[in-house]
Amino acid sequence: MFTVIIPVKNRANYLYYTLQTCTIQDYENFQVIVSDDGSTDNLREVVEEASRKDPRIKYVSPNNGLGVGMRDNFEFALSLVKEGYVIALGGDDALLPKSISKAAAILKETDQSILSWPA
């Protein structure tokens, strides 16, 4: 299982495209958790529309949508991961096609528990 966490605030225009890159992945066993840190734009609507098209996408918000700050929002999203691997994205980031399946193959081939690369 791979979980993509996206801790975000006020990035609705970008998040639409970020979520599109998640939904085109060829790896089946993954979910996307978007953790909204009190956005004042239409971020929730963007996520809810995407989740209607792809039920692997989930909207959450710590502190009943009042905002907790970037670090605590990240920790909140991370606390919702129950098993497997985690990929953290910003609200304006993207996944390349097949990136999750390629990461899964590398992890299996190398028998490692973490995969990272330089910026």
Image (cartoon, grey):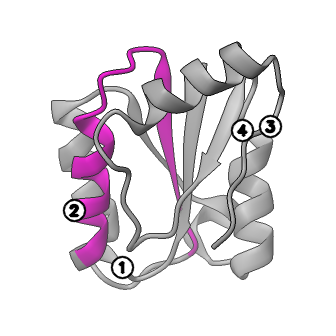
The tag on residue 17 is 2
Left or right: 16 in relation to 27: left
Residue occupying image coordinates x 36% and y 79%: 11
Say which residue label 4 marks.
80
Can residue 64 be found in the magenta stretch? no
Q: Residues within 10 Å of mark 2 (few under 14, many from 20)?
A: some
Q: Nearer the viewer, mark 1 or mark 2?
A: 2
The tag on residue 30 is none
For badge 1, the amino acid type reads: Arg
Along the polypeptide, which appears first: circle 4 or circle 2? 2
Residue 1 occupies quadrant: top right
The alpha-carbon separation of the residues under discs 3 and 4 comes to: 19 Å
Q: For the residues labelled 3 and 4, say whether their Cβ atoms are less than 8 Å apart.
A: no
Front one among 30 and 8: 30
Residue 40: percent from the left, percent from the top? 38, 85
Front one among 20 and 64: 20
Region rendered in magenta? 14-37
For badge 4, the amino acid type reads: Leu
Q: Nearer the viewer, mark 3 or mark 1?
A: 3
The alpha-carbon separation of the residues under discs 1 and 2 comes to: 10 Å
Residue 10: percent from the left, percent from the top? 40, 83
Residue 43: percent from the left, percent from the top? 32, 69
The alpha-carbon separation of the residues under discs 3 and 1 comes to: 28 Å
Q: For the residues labelled 1 and 2, say whether their Cβ atoms are less than 8 Å apart.
A: no
Q: For the residues labelled 3 and 1, say whether their Cβ atoms are less than 8 Å apart.
A: no
Can residue 34 be found in the magenta stretch? yes
Q: Secondary structure at mark 1?
A: loop
Residue occupying image coordinates x 51% and y 69%: 90
Say which residue label 3 marks.
114
